[in-house]
């Protein structure tokens, strides 16, 4: 006996879906191409506005794109028209992370949350920011110090990116360099060392003149100041605490970089005045004994720990 195949609604739906699948994929590919073209047009316009490209160079890039369909930034780089720094700066301007034609100094090389906002590391800093904002110690975020081990590089990396991450929320953020034996923050942002914190504590300059806006939107810096053989002694004076009180009122969030923890007591004076500290440790570098000593030093000056990060 022959059977008659019944074509119910479900069969008709499946057939229509099969017929429409290629059309749907084609429509999606067309949408992605359009989105990329619009994104690269905006990038080119921003680079032209920033003075990195002109009409002639844009024409060369577009002509090569028509022939190769390669990404805009790749072609511009291969032609020697742009550097990675140029592209990252333009993207930062587009995202509102970098002040256009304003601010002092340069964008730090280690500012991954601005340079590469879609990277895994940038996402980790945003997650770190969220944990701090939702933690029980969130009230201490108004001003806190960075407490690190013997190497300052990891601590500086975390300080710069944490500061920039809060600035991206529209908070008015200040990054302070309280290591008066070095000029780490000034070097990072390509700024003159002074006037800075040392001149402020010594009464040589008005703190409002020492604070400088950076190229990162909503982020200002107070550098350590010009090096002086006895400048670090100013950290033990009451003036440091009074300075921090002013900064608490003037900014939403103040992050204070300190000298690496070690034989000298510079960092402890800053931790005590700040009242709170964020610990940064280095994977496979900081030993357990060092971390115990760091924690004991924080307890000794009654500085509470508001968070911690394990840097690579």
Image (cartoon, rainbow, N blue to C red):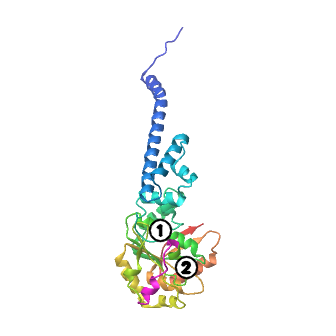
User: Is residue 207 shown above or below 122?
Assistant: below
> Which residue is rendered at x = 48% and y = 38% of the image?
29
Q: Is residue 198 magenta?
A: yes
Quarter occupied by the N terminus? top right
Q: Residues within 10 Å of mark 2 (few under 14, many from 20)?
A: some
Tell me where residue 295 appears, x and y as whole percent.
Answer: 55, 79
SS under mark 1: helix
Label 1 and label 2: CA atoms lie apart by 21 Å
Tell me where residue 142 appears, x and y as whole percent.
Answer: 39, 74
Q: Is residue 172 magenta?
A: no
Residue 162: numbered disc: 1
User: Is residue 244 shown above or below 58?
Assistant: below
Q: Earlier in the sequence, mark 1 or mark 2?
A: 1
Instruction: Find residue 280 and report its image quarter.
Output: bottom right
User: Is residue 9 shown above or below 308?
Assistant: above
Q: Residue furthest left?
A: 249
The residue range painted magenta reads: 188-203
Q: Residue furthest top?
A: 1
Residue 199 visible in this rendered orientation of the protein: yes
Marks 1 and 2 in Cβ contact (< 8 Å): no
Residue topped by disc 2: 295
Left or right: residue 305 versus residue 310 is left
SS under mark 2: helix
> Which residue is rendered at x = 60% and y = 76% of the image?
151
In this rendering, the count of numbered labels is: 2
Tell me where residue 275 appears, x and y as whole percent.
Answer: 44, 81
Residue 123 visible in this rendered orientation of the protein: no
Residue 16: numbered disc: none
Q: Report the mark closest to the observer, 1 or 2.
A: 1
Q: Nearer the viewer, residue 139 or 24?
A: 24
């Amino acid at each position: 006996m022959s059977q008659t195949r019944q074509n119910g609604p479900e069969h008709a739906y499946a057939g229509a879906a099969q017929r429409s699948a290629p059309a749907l994929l084609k429509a999606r590919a067309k949408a992605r191409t359009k989105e990329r073209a619009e994104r690269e047009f905006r990038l080119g316009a921003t680079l032209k506005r920033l003075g990195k490209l002109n009409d002639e160079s844009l024409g060369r890039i577009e002509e090569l794109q028509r022939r190769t369909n390669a990404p805009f930034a790749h072609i511009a780089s291969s032609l020697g028209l742009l550097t990675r720094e140029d592209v990252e700066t333009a993207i930062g301007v587009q995202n509102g992370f970098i002040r256009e034609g304003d601010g002092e100094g340069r964008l730090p090389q280690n500012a991954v949350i601005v340079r590469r906002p879609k990277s895994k590391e940038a996402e980790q800093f945003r997650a770190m920011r969220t944990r701090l904002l939702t933690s029980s110690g969130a009230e201490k975020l108004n001003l806190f110090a960075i407490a690190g081990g013997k190497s300052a590089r990891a601590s500086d990396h975390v300080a710069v990116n944490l500061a920039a991450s809060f600035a991206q929320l529209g908070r008015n953020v200040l990054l302070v360099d309280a290591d008066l034996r070095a000029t780490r923050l000034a070097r990072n942002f390509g700024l003159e060392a002074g006037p800075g914190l040392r001149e402020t504590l010594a009464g040589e300059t008005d703190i409002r003149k020492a604070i400088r806006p950076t190229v990162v939107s909503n982020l200002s810096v107070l550098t350590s100041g010009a090096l002086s053989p006895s400048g670090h002694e100013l950290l033990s004076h009451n003036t440091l605490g009074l300075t921090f009180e002013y900064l608490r009122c003037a900014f939403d969030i103040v992050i204070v970089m300190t000298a690496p923890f070690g034989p000298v007591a510079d960092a402890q004076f800053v931790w005590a005045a700040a009242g709170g500290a964020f610990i940064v440790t280095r994977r496979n570098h900081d030993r357990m004994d060092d971390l115990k000593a760091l924690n004991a030093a924080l307890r000794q000056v009654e500085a509470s720990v508001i968070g911690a990060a394990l840097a690579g």
